[in-house]
Structure formats: structure tokens, C-alpha cells
Image: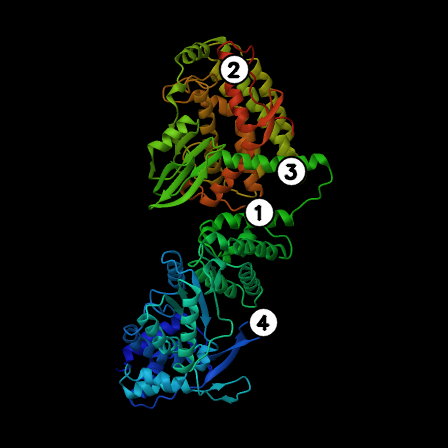
Amino acid sequence: MQLTYSLLKDAWNEVRAKGSSGGIDRISINDFKQKEEKYLMQIAFKLKNKTYLPQAYLQIKIPKDKDEKRILGLATVHDKIVQTAIKNLLEQRFEKHFFSSSYAYRLRLGPRKAVNKVRHYIMAEKNKIIAKCDIDNYFDTINHTRLFKQLKPLVQDNYLLELIRMFIRMGYIDKDRQWKERTAGVPQGAVLSPLLANLYLTPLDQRMHAKNIPYVRYADDFVILCKNRQNAEEVLNQTMQYISTQLKLKLNPGYFIREASEGFRFLGVWITDKFITLSSGKIKELQQKIKRAFRHPSFPQKYHDQVEGISNYYGNLIPQNILFPLDELLIKLWTEKLNLLPGRVSKKQLKKALKHLRFVTDLYNRHLNMHRKSIINTVYELRNQKQITTAEQAVRLRRREYQRKFMENMHLHIGGYGKSIGISKNKITVRHKDRTITKYPTKNLRYITISARPANLSTEFINFCVQNGISVDLVKSNGEPYAKIFDFHHIYVKTWTKQEKTAQSEKALVIAREILGAKITNQIRLIKYFGKYAAKTEEDIALFMPGALTQLQDLLSEAKSVPFSGEFREKLMGYEGIASAIYWQWFRMMIDEETGTFTGRITRRAVDPVNSMLNYGYAILYRHVWNSVLAQGLHPEYGFLHAHARGKASLVFDLIEPFRQPVVDRAVLAVINRKFPIAAPKGKIDKPTKQRLIRAVDANLARYEKYLNKKFPMIDNIHRQTQLLRMYIMGQEKRFKAYKMINW
């Protein structure tokens, strides 16, 4: 049994991966790494020539409970490597002599299986009486003579046996550099100690096995399970006597016998005959550990270690929901920490500060981005709270909040690569590689946009959407729809026939003039809204605006006087073109400092970020108007302002016009004015820009605005305008009135 260079090399890799501290010689992992070849050769040479001399352990004390401290011995990196090599050499040989009742420090076992075995004995085998014991000061009281008597048959190489004896007998050096002798026990913290501690109690495991006594041991902590109290008392007394006389150990005074239904603590969890949980005291203890780690000088590393430790241990022992209070505490601690950051802090800075966010449970970690966003919004709101001094202000703020929530619940966007979309228990399920990544509630859901490519849609999903009036749009990366799922019952030939006749009548001029008038009016009002602030600081805007507004007002008046003829559409579109040129010149001046790349409106093959954003925003609006047209049974191709052409959704383009400014242009200006970086490589806006734009457009669609003397969300005003148009076409209304923004 040789400790070869290869074994030492493997052992070094293990020690390095753990990254633990060095010992008394102050050689760290990084120090050793600098000269690893030299050090490993030295260790191998000394072991071969039997000249290896272990260092003393560096004594440290850590809290055990309120009144006691646990003494640990830190070995040097050299000694850890040798001990790890010995452990790896002997572990498989020892395993053959261990019993299935022992669960500590063994591959593929551990606390979860130990707890499950205890529960099996209680619930499946009906052992309702338990004796709970643990050995007093176990690691420090192991008898050396007996330990090496057990070791000798298993380790027949005398030098290897003496090496183990060296590591077990080696003393401590305390903080005062004083030598502390070791005559019993195995050093806690040493690599070999767990293996040797398991070996020492193997005779107890053997005895229980021979007597066929249900029994589970984890290191020095064990449970005996019996059918009745008399049997439990008898077994416990015999076990105590064996431990005392044969193993030279004693039990902690806190041992007891009780019914499993009363519950008992084992390996940090509370077990009964019906369930497993954590006591309120243990939850508070874990919460205190997290708080200390959160405020530790080595944050975030200490915090990560604590969260990972709790997750790895308790996450595998108990139902995850029991640990949710720990994750809620983490959200609270992060919120408090970020709220103390000095000065004004942007959401981008808060997101950067939250890069270390980790949770205990898998569920919270799976929704990490959602919780990060929630913390950021909470902190941002706390730090930017305004004084609420009037009822009108309070109502306005809450209205905006619920308008935003309304739109978030109404619209679901599914992007990414390779998604499978289905329906389960009235929830939209999105899967990727056989794993469910999202379950979205369908209550209040009205629109689904799918940009994922490729995407698999189940027939159950399609049927559910059709039956519940949920519009589904399949879109390209630029937001442009290429397919739509809708109920074919929305096809009304009678309405189409009436619509086609109207498009050729004088009524078409009335509709076209109203739509164009609404568009130019909305352009004027958007310029006034944004321009009145910009004109105070921008000289070129201040000079440009009065003339521009006068020109637009004149164009509006002239458009209203266009007579009915075969060319009325061309004349109206001529006015539309002139008005748009003036409008986009103002728009360019508004954003010139922020972008510098926008020279004018480009509808197709745009490569600059601003036009790419406008095109993407209009594509969103286009889909909503198209949904509205289909829902009202109108034909998308028979327009009134835009000429009819096969394959061109002329009516959709008509009905979009009044909503471009309040929904999309306003959103694009808002994103740019907030100084967010925007990018559109090869004409495709990047993901952050796209997400900000979608949020801004959705916010405008959820905003309550007045139309037809009543206030509704803008998304509903789109449908009300389409409905009014259908009723006007069918002769059910005497007048059609397109949407116009109120004077902000």
C-alpha cells in the first residue's frame, strides 16, 4: 500500500478544489500552487524514505452552542494532501466492513437517506417507540488503543499505520503558540478523522445488526426504534453498557425514550410519525446565521457559503416550502441593504448590486430574475417616493400602478429558442428541453405573442385560445407578424360586402378625412406635450416649433376640405406625407443629442436604433389593430384612407394611424429620454432595448384615455374605434369619430 506520486497529485487536486485554509506553517493553497511540482516531489520523497514529519495542528475555536466552543485542528496543506491520499487509499477497503445502518461521511449516503430510513422504520415497519442518543464529546474521547487495534487488520503496512498514528497523536498549537498534548480522540477538522470515527463505532453497528435491532447512526448521533417501550428500555440499557465498557465512551445526558408521535430532533430536523419539518427555533437559528453572514466582512462570499450550505443540507431533507421564510428574509435583507446605498441610484446600478443574489430553495432560484426585478422596483420606489399631499395625486399614482398590472396580466410574450407551448389546468405551460420553465395564468389573458423559433404549439393550446377569445400572433424577430390564430367564426361575408361598397362611396371620404385629421391632430398634440419642455432649453426646437405647428394646423384644415372624387385618397395621402415630414423633422431634433443616428423615418430595412424601435413598436400596434378588425368581422384589405390592394391590410393601416403617436412614438421618446443605451445591430434592436420598448408600449396601451366621452384603457379604445367604424359602415351609427388624444 504505497502513497505514490499519482495518489498525492490526485489528493492535491481535491485539497485545492476545497480551497480550505492552511495551517501552522502559513503556506496557503495559492502558495502551494506556485510550487506544486516541487512540494509534491518533496512529499513523495519523504514518504518513500520514511522521513515525513507532520506539523502540529493550529488550534481554533468556533461556537458550538450558547455556552460551549468546539475545538478544531487546522492541518497544513502538506498534511492535508497526505491525509487525503491515505483516506483515498483506505476508503474502499473500510467500506467493506461498514454496515448499512451507518450514514455519515460515506459516498452516496448522507443525512437525507438517514432521515428517510428512520421514517421508514417508523411509518412502514410501525416502530412507534424511539430511543434517541448521541455520544458525549465523541471525537475528543475516542480511545487510541482500541482504535489502532481495529485498524491493524485493515492496514497491514506498518509505516502507513504509523503515519496515521502520527496524524492522530500530533498535538495542537494554540493562539499563544503553546503546545497542547493529545492522548485521546481524533482531531476535529482533520481529513482522516471522519473515516476513523466511523470505523471506531462499527462494532456498535455490528452488534445492532446481529440482534436485528432497527437502528440508524449518523456519526455519534443515533436512533434506536422499537415496537414498545419495554423493549426500547431494554435495548437502550444494553447499548449504554456496551458503549461504556467496550468502546470506553458515554452518552450525553439528554438521551430519551418517547413515542414517535411526540416528535424528536435528528440531524437538525423534527421528525414525527406523520411528517418531517423544522422547529420554529431551528428556523430562527438559520435566520440568525443568514443575518450574520449577510453582515460579515467577507460578504458576499460568506453569504454565498451560508446560503449554499443551508440549501445543500436542508434542501435535501425537508419539503422546500418550509425553507421559504429564509428566502423571504433574504429579499428583506437585500432590500434593506440596497436602500442604504448613498446618493441617487438608477435601476441599472441596483441590478448590478444584485448580481450576487442567491436563494436557499430551488423554486426561488428558478425565479431569480423575477425576484431581482421585484427587489429593484421596491427599492427604487422607496428611494424615489414622492410626498402624497392630495387625493387626486394618490388616485393618479394608484391608477397608473393598476393600469400597468392590468396590461402585464393581459399580454404574454414567449420568446427564445425551441419552446413547446401547451395548456394545463387553465394555465399556459412553456417547456424547453422537457422542462417546464413557465406556467402562466390565463385569467384576464387576451393576447399571446410568440417570437420563439422554432416553437411547438399543442392542439389543446390552440383550441383553448380560440374558445376563450385569446389572440395568438406568431412574429418575426423585428416584431412583424407572419401568422395569426383566430376563430374562423369571425368571418362575416355580409359585413365584408357592405364594407367593400362603402369603400367606393362618398362615405369612404368621410372616414378617410376623419382618420387623417385624427392623426395630424395627435401629431400636433404630441409636439406640444414634449416640445414645451424641450423648447425651454433647446434653441433650435424653440425656433422650429411655432412654424411647424402652424403648418400642421393649415394642413389639417386643407385636408378637411378635400372633395369626393376618384383621387381623394391620393390627395389625402399627399397631405399625410407633408405632415409626416414636418413631424419627423421635429422628432429628429428632439432626440438628436441622445442618438445622432436618426436622420428621418425609414419604414423598411432600417438599420439605425430609432427607426428599428419605431418599426418594432408599430408591429405591436399593428397586431392589436388586426385583432380588433377580425373581432369585428371586418375585412383587413378594404381600407378607406389607404387604397385597397390584394395582400395589403389597408384597413389595419387606416385604423393604426390615430394611435401611432400616443402609443408608439410616445414610448420611443420615453425610452430615449431616460438615457437608456439603445442598440440595433443589423437593424434588430437588442434584448434590453426590446424589453424596455415593450414595457413602454404596454404601459401606454394600459393607460386610461378619454374617447367618445368616456375613459378606457387605450387598448380598449382601439377596439371601440373599430367597433364604431363597423357600426357606421352598417348604418347603425350616423357618425364615425376617430380617436384623438386629449390636450395633455
Residue 198 vs residue 72: left or right?
A: left
Numbered disc 1: secondary structure: helix
Residue 315 shows in this picture? yes
Q: Which dot marks residue 377?
A: 1
User: Which one is in front, 290 or 401?
Assistant: 290
- Residue at image point 39% right, 60% down: 127
**Amino acid of disc 4:** Lys
Mark 4, residue position:
66
Question: Considering depth in this image, is 523 or 536 the residue closer to the camera?
Answer: 523
Label 2 to label 3: alpha-carbon separation: 37 Å
Question: Who comes first in sequence, dot 1 or dot 2?
Answer: 1
Q: Which residue is mark 3?
A: 397
- Crowd rating for badge 1 (residues with CA inside 10 Å; few <14, some 14–19, many 20+): some
Name the quadrant of the N terminus. Answer: bottom left
CA separation in Å, label 4 and label 1: 39 Å
Name the kind of residue labelled 1 in the image: Asn
Residue bearing the label numbered 2:
511
Q: Residues within 10 Å of mark 3 (few under 14, many from 20)?
A: few
Dots 2, 3 in contact, CB < 8 A: no
Residue found 42% across the figure and 58% down from its top: 316
- Location of the C terminus by quadrant is top right
Q: Residue at x 48, y 34 (%)?
A: 411
If you read the primary sequence from the N terminus, does the residue marked by circle 2 or circle 3 appear first?
3
Q: Could you say where residue 98 lies in the image, as x and y percent from the top left?
A: 31, 72
The amino acid type of the residue labelled 2 equals Ile
* SS label for mark 4: loop
Amino acid type, callout 3: Leu
Q: Earlier in the sequence, mark 3 or mark 4?
A: 4
